[in-house]
Amino acid sequence: MNNEFELDSLIKKMADGDQPELPSPGLIWWRAQILKKQHEKERIERPLIIMRMLAAVVCLIVFVWLWIRESAAMGNLFEQSGILPILLAGAATMVFIGLVWWTKSEA
């Protein structure tokens, strides 16, 4: 196919030969039921997602508040035990929070 005219005529022939078909009524109903269930699941899980985010924000605020309030004690803790145990505890906490955030309710 060297020119656009041949390409256009080939595309028109392919389009004329193909007759579009509507899906069966059963398939349309089945898809509608699946969409309905997905929307119901999203509606039910929306408050859980909001509460999960709110809990994470509250925990972060409490953590920062306690860190600021006890900054002198935290400084002494760093001097006495080093930073490694605190980093390990922080990593374990982040893994736990990640697992809780990642797992979703199965409905």
Image (spheres, rainbow, N blue to C red):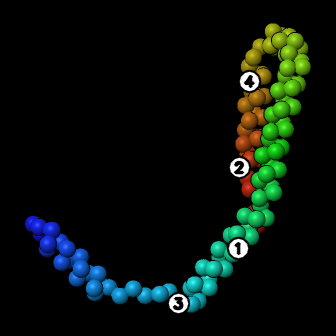
Gap between marks 3 and 4 measured at Cα: 60 Å
What is the secondary structure assignment of the residue under circle 4? helix
Which is in the foreground here, disc 2 or disc 4? 2
Which is in the foreground here, disc 2 or disc 1? 1
Name the residue at 80% across, 41% down.
56
What is the secondary structure assignment of the residue under circle 1? helix
Which is in the foreground here, disc 4 or disc 1? 1
Residue corresponding to mark 3? 24
The answer to whether one can see residue 86 in this image is yes
Give percent across and percent down for residue 29: 62, 85
- Under mark 2, the amino acid is Trp
Which is in the foreground here, disc 2 or disc 3? 3
Nearer-N-terminus badge (2/1):
1
Q: Are marks 3 and 4 in contact (CB under 8 Å)?
A: no
Across the whole image, how many numbered discs are drawn on residues? 4
Give percent across and percent down for residue 92: 75, 34
Nearer-N-terminus badge (2/4):
4
Gap between marks 4 and 1 measured at Cα: 44 Å
The answer to whether one can see residue 77 in this image is no
Task: Tell me the crowding category of disc 2: few under 14, some 14 to 19, or many 20 or more residues within 10 angstroms, Cα based.
Answer: few
Residue corresponding to mark 4? 87
Nearer-N-terminus badge (1/3):
3
- Under mark 3, the amino acid is Ser
Q: Are marks 2 and 4 in contact (CB under 8 Å)?
A: no
- Under mark 1, the amino acid is Lys
Nearer-N-terminus badge (4/1):
1
Residue corresponding to mark 1? 37
- Under mark 4, the amino acid is Leu
Residue corresponding to mark 2? 102
What is the secondary structure assignment of the residue under circle 2? helix
Gap between marks 2 and 4 measured at Cα: 22 Å
Which is in the foreground here, disc 3 or disc 4? 3
